[in-house]
Amino acid sequence: MSNAPLALITGAGRGIGRAVAEALAPGHALVLAGRDRDVLDRTRAELTAPHGAHVLTVDLGDAASRASFLSEVTGLESQLGARVQVLVNNAGAALSAPLARTGDDAWARLLELNCTAPFVLTRALVPGMLAAGWGRVVNVASTAAIKGYAYTAAYSASKAGLLGWTRALAVELASKDVTVNAVCPGFTDTDIVADAARNIQATTGRSEDDARKALARFSPQGRLRSPAEVADLVAWLARRGAGGVTGQALAIDGGETA
């Protein structure tokens, strides 16, 4: 059995989640979680993971699926003789729509996936971190949690809620060497931004390339973030040596929220 800490990453098959898996793999045993088994298996096959990587599927927007998933995590912990000590709540969804077209179902879906699901996983896994003597929770939020963007009321509310309980739990656990932080990426080169660019293209008639450039211009650096940039920050927060940093919302946005 590896002595490396066990790290669980949600939304690990693509984008920021996959980049986090790559960043953590050298020093951690990994649990790669997400909805698409084929994508997760491909990610695992392409990783260099000296301490092992395990795949578990889950629909985090569904309470029954979450409960089954957490039972599987408990079984895996027993099998490995280790507790999850690093939790990266990365999985999420976005919606761009004006207020009048933001329906109740969409509102509830984003709150469930972006705010409630990370809370449920954290609540379930923090006791194991306490038993192990230390732990790190890193929530992937958004600059939408700390500034306003038009047409993102549901998304912004869900990420602001995530940031709220991040801070509260950080204070609650501060004396236990369990840190809870959030990273807040600006527009990042992921599927979510690709969808946003296509939405701009469809509604304005601009080319997809022009739409991507418009999103990049939100940053004073004039470019999108890369998933690897975000992952590097997540990996730093996951270090045992980063125990003095907790309750923080760390923007990685090229100066957009300065």
Image: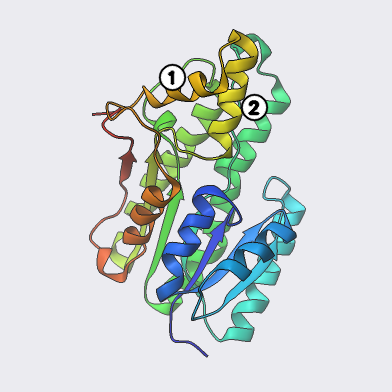
For label 1, count other residues whose C-alpha is less than 10 Å away and answer few (under 14), some (14-19) or many (20+): some
Residue 173, visible in the rendered structure: no
Counting from the top left corner in percent of width and height, residue 2 is at 48, 87
Residue 233, visible in the rendered structure: yes
Counting from the top left corner in percent of width and height, residue 134 is at 37, 72
Give the residue type at disc 1.
Ala
Kindly state the secondary structure of the residue where label 1 is placed. Answer: helix
What separation in Å lies between label 1 and label 2 (alpha carbons)?
A: 26 Å
Counting from the top left corner in percent of width and height, residue 140 is at 46, 46
Kindly state the secondary structure of the residue where label 2 is placed. Answer: helix
Give the residue type at disc 2.
Trp
Lower sequence index among marks 1 and 2: 2
Q: Which residue is mark 1?
A: 214
Q: Are marks 1 and 2 in contact (CB under 8 Å)?
A: no
Q: Which residue is mark 2?
A: 107
Q: Quadrant of residue 42?
A: bottom right
Task: Name the residue: 68% across, 57% down.
Answer: 39
